[in-house]
Structure formats: structure tokens, C-alpha cells
Image: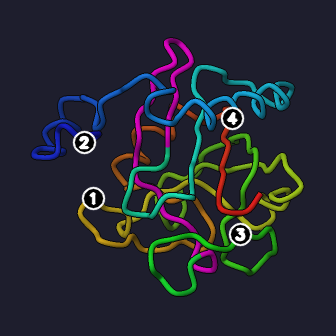
Amino acid sequence: MLFAFRAAPFLLAVCGLSFAQAEPAEDLIGAKLLEEALAAKADAESEIRNDRYFSVIDYRAPSNVPRYFLIDTKDMSAEAFLVAHGKGSDPDHDGMADQFSNIEGSKMTSLGAFVTGATYYGQHGLSLRLKGLSPQNDLAEKRLIVIHGADYVAEGRAILGRSWGCPALSREIAERIIPLIKGGTFMYAVGTQR
């Protein structure tokens, strides 16, 4: 449903076409989660410098389901992508993030409100710094929690690989959307804990 162009992602990348089909954000995310994310975004208004896009991650879904939502505020459309969670959040590696933490060295995913920072090139290629705005993620910068691409995030895997707490995307998607969301866009992540 979401990945209408599965057959030829390389051709689509060469042509500059989207990997996922945009749908109304409320239809894709659900009215309740979208409302919650918009309220958190309003609370973080002073931190937001780039308001064209914002992101919502729903870690309540399994890792093999697109659960990273990129919302275009121009028309409130959204696209959904696969995203990995932290190894410590899924100790039995069943594809479900069950535990969340802000503790350095936990290798767990953090929840709450974030704002994006600057890009850099590291061991995972193009990466995007994240600043935690909530008590449950305010150590994100110190923990080096960033958005990056990873080979273990790929369509067709029964269970995605796990990061060390970062919201890792496929390499192709990371290369495409990091330039759109860098420099002060809002990101909101929810999970089984609050």
C-alpha cells in the first residue's frame, strides 16, 4: 500500500521520484497521534527553525512496518518509512521496542519531542544530530542519538536490525529526507511507555 513503487527503487532514485506515496497525514498516522504530535510541536515552537516538515515515529508498531512519518506542513500530507529502534529497547530481538531509556550506554531508544540539528558525515554516512526537548530524551546529544542510514533497515526483512538507540532509516531514505529535515525541524516519538 505505502510502497507503490517497490519494483524499481533505483530507477526512482535516479529519476528523483518519491519512494513512498504521500497520503493525508491524518489517514496515515491516525487523528489521535497526529493531534498529540501537533500539540507537542506547538509546545516546542521556540526551538523550531524549519517548519516545512516534521516527523512522527510510532514505536508501538513492529520494526518491519513503516512507522516513521514525514509530514509536509504545506498540505499536511505524509509519507511512511521503515525505521529501526535501539538494541536495548528490543533485547529479545522480536522486532518490538518494549523498553525505552535516556541513559547513556543503554542502547535504548528515547521517546518524546526532539528538534533536528546539523548534518555531518560519520561511520553511517550522512547523519543528522538530534536535540532532546523532553525529560525522557534530554541526553540525546550526549548519547549521540542521530538519524542515519543503515543497511539493516530494508524492506522485506521479517525483523529489522537494531541501532544503538538511533532512529535509523534505510540509506536511500536517509539520503533523501535528511536534507529536508535538517536545521530545526520537529520530531516526536511515541512508544509503549510515556
Circle 1 is placed at which residue position?
Answer: 155
Q: Amino acid at mark 3?
A: Phe
Magenta-tinted stretch: 69-89
Among numbered discs 4 and 2, the one appearing first in the sequence: 2
Q: Position of residue 146 (x, y in %)?
A: 63, 57
Q: Secondary structure at mark 3?
A: loop
Say if mark 1 contacts mark 2, CB within 8 Å. Answer: yes
Q: CA distance from mark 1 to mark 3?
A: 24 Å
Q: CA distance from mark 4 to mark 2?
A: 24 Å
Circle 3 is placed at which residue position?
Answer: 100
Residue 79 part of the magenta segment = yes
Circle 4 is placed at which residue position?
Answer: 37
Query: As displayed, is residue 90 above or below residue 20?
Result: below
Scheme of image coloration:
rainbow
Q: Kindly give the residue lying farthest to the left in the view shown.
A: 7
Among numbered discs 2 and 3, the one appearing first in the sequence: 2
